Amino acid sequence: MIGLIASDGGLWLDVWSCVRAKVEMNDYQNKHGQPAINISFPGSNPEGLSFEAMLHHLINGLAEVSVILMDADGMILRCTSITATRLGFSTPEDVVDKRLDEIAPEDWANERIRLIKKTIELNTQTTLLSILHGRRMRTAVNPIKLPDGSAVVLATIEQVSPECFDELRKIGDSETTLIGEVNDLGVLDVLSPRELEVLALLGQGHRPKDIATILHRSLSTVDGHRERIGEKLGVRDRAKLMSIARIAALQVDDAQRARIRLDAQDSPAD
């Protein structure tokens, strides 16, 4: 998990609570006419790096972390390899200098571009809780004000458990913590809305009899849905079905939300 917090005129970057970097914004120009930034990491002290060099140094050092830097219009400036893979591409070079709506379905991209603009407008971290490739993900979007007055955002993407998902919804407010309305269900995309509702309730630990009551359906109808879910997913074991639902932190309301597909290598069945 990565957190970005404004403090003492700088930005503190905490990577899994073991790497700390303070990024000091300076108002002088380097030899290329760009704003320069000093970075200090434990054990090293590179000085006078340009903004571009700082991003290269920082993001390339986080190759196994899903990090993406974008401008106010959703243009991708830098990203890590794992981010490119999650977007369905082979390398970061495939997506850098492209807008989100150029590389992803329009509705999905626009939801995130709106979040970027809100993050910059409010000048505070925002969070999007959505499903990507059948996994529940938390996208934390942090604003970064540049010396020239413009702004970019640094977004980090991490998988969260159902418990973490519930906690984030409880502590967040409706202005800054949003539930994704456009999701990539991955392997779950083969399921009908009703089957998604049944699977969500199974993942939450409800028994078939309870699910029938909640959905106002007969027990035999629920058993039929459960049988078809198993056939479609190639999973017969109830515990395995519950695990797949929990990986997505699947909610009943997700059944009615818009669906898209982003090509990628990972799936909850991995």
Image: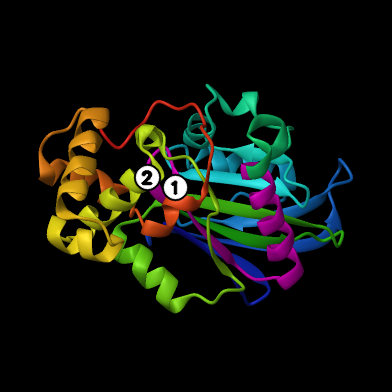
Q: Which residues are magenta?
A: 108-137
The answer to whether 201 is drawn above or below residue 199 in the figure is: below
**In the shown orientation, is residue 86 left or right of residue 136?**
right
Residue 205 in picture, x, y percent from top left: 17, 60
Q: Residues within 10 Å of mark 1 (few under 14, many from 20)?
A: many
Residue depicted at x 33% and y 52%: 197
Labels in figure, total:
2
Which x, y percent locates residue 153?
67, 55
Q: CA distance from mark 2 to mark 1?
A: 5 Å
Q: Quadrant of the C terminus?
A: top left
Q: Which label sits on residue 131?
A: 1
User: How far across and how far down the image is residue 192, in percent?
Assistant: 38, 40
Look at the numbered discs 2 and 1 and tell me whether their residues touch, using CB distance below 8 Å. yes
Describe residue 70's horizontal placement relative to residue 249 as left or right: right
Q: Is 77 on the left or on the right of 59, as rendered?
A: right
Which residue is tagged 2? 135
Residue at screen point 11% across, 46% down? 239
| SS at circle 1 | strand
